[in-house]
């Protein structure tokens, strides 16, 4: 049972890290689309995707690792969750704005 628990723990960390990298890639590709077409809506879409995926996942991933390793006290768990949710909200806000902006 201990080996299975350790495997699940490693899978969780691996998926969180992979999500962070993949989110950065998606945000970068959206930014490239903005640069290629010089579109205002693409600029907001790329910022939104980057905040929603790469930044939010990175804050959550790094924060959870620091909490698990005891580098940060447990009292920082709620502020880290708040920061993560704030980046997610801002990302969705930028994406929604990009869908309604006119060129």
Image (cartoon, helix red, strand yellow):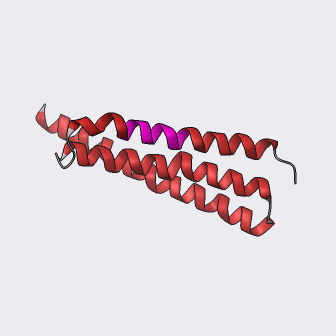
Residue 61 visible to the viewer: yes
Q: Considering the image in quadrants, where does the C terminus appear?
A: bottom right
Q: Is residue 54 left or right of residue 3?
A: right
| Quadrant of the rendered image containing residue 83 | top left
- State whether residue 35 is above or below residue 89: below
| Quadrant of the rendered image containing residue 74 | top left
Relative image position of residue 3 (x, y in whole percent): 14, 38
Q: Residue furthest top?
A: 1
Q: Is residue 49 left or right of residue 54?
A: right
Give the residue drawn at x 58%, y 55%.
Answer: 26
Check if residue 81 falls in the magenta segment.
yes
The magenta region covers: 80-88
Residue 15 visible to the viewer: no
Q: Is residue 17 left or right of residue 68?
A: right
Q: Is residue 68 left or right of residue 51?
A: left
Give the residue drawn at x 48%, y 37%.
Answer: 85
Relative image position of residue 72 (x, y in whole percent): 22, 46
SS majority, magenta: helix
Foreground residue among 101 and 19? 101
Q: Number of labelled discs?
A: 0
Q: Residue furthest right?
A: 103
Relative image position of residue 70 (x, y in whole percent): 16, 45
Relative image position of residue 89 (x, y in whole percent): 57, 38
Give the residue drawn at x 36%, y 41%.
Answer: 80
Q: Considering the image in quadrants, where does the N terminus appear?
A: top left
């Amino acid at each position: 049972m201990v080996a299975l628990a350790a495997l699940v723990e490693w899978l969780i960390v691996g998926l969180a890290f992979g999500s962070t990298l993949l989110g950065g890639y998606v945000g970068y590709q959206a930014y490239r689309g903005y640069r290629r077409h010089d579109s205002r809506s693409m600029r907001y879409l790329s910022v939104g995707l980057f905040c929603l995926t790469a930044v939010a996942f990175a804050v959550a991933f790094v924060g959870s690792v620091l909490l698990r390793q005891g580098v940060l006290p447990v009292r920082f768990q709620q502020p880290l969750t708040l920061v993560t949710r704030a980046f997610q909200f801002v990302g969705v806000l930028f994406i929604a704005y990009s869908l309604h902006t006119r060129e």
